[in-house]
Every structure is written in C-alpha cells, then in structure tokens.
C-alpha cells in the first residue's frame, strides 16, 4: 500500500474526495436545507392569506323574512 506517494496518487485522492463531496455530502446538505425552509414556511403565517372580515349573512327563510316561515310554526302547533 503506497499511501500518499507521488503527485498522481495525491491527485487521485483529491478527485475521489471531490466526487464524494458532490455525490453524497452536498446533496444531503441541500436536502436538509430544503426541508428546513419548507418547515419554516409552513410554520410562519402567510401575511397575504384570505381572512373573512364580514359576518355571514343569515338565511332569510329561518329568520322569517320570507313568507312561509309562519306556516311551519303553525303546522307544528296543529300537530300537537
């Protein structure tokens, strides 16, 4: 086993280390960074999301604003 003798052997170790970095280490770091960014976006509230500011409009049939609501009350009384 030659170890680190000669310039060509040193160059091959540099190439192997560079390939290992770009094939294994850098992609895993990028993946972790993307996951952290997604988690940060999911946890922070969106300032531009839609917020309902008006109260919902009540059903006029239930409130008796449309004719026919009294008939329902009268029919319940007739059944008693």
Image: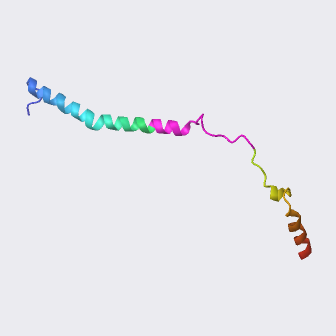
Quadrant in which residue 46 is drawn: top right
Q: Does residue 19 show up?
A: yes
Residue ID at (86%, 58%): 64
Q: Relative to 46, is 56 above or below?
A: below
Quadrant in which residue 17 is drawn: top left
Q: Is residue 41 magenta?
A: yes
Camera-side residue: 36 or 50?
A: 50
Camera-side residue: 55 or 31?
A: 55
Quadrant in which residue 13 is drawn: top left
Residue ID at (38%, 38%): 31
Q: Which residues are magenta?
A: 36-54
Relative image position of residue 33 (x, y in whole percent): 41, 35
Relative image position of residue 32 (x, y in whole percent): 40, 37
Q: Is residue 38 left or right of residue 31?
A: right
Q: Quadrant of the N terminus?
A: top left
Q: Quadrant of the C terminus?
A: bottom right
Camera-side residue: 7 or 71?
A: 71
Camera-side residue: 40 or 55?
A: 55
Residue ID at (89%, 64%): 70
Q: Is residue 17 left or right of residue 35?
A: left
């Amino acid at each position: 086993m030659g170890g680190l003798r000669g310039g060509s052997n040193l160059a091959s170790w540099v190439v192997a280390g560079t390939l290992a970095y770009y094939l294994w280490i850098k992609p895993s770091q990028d993946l972790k960074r993307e996951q952290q960014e997604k988690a940060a976006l999911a946890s922070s509230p969106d300032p531009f999301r839609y917020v309902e500011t008006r109260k919902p409009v009540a059903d006029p049939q239930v409130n008796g604003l449309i004719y026919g609501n009294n008939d329902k009350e009268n029919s319940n009384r007739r059944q008693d």
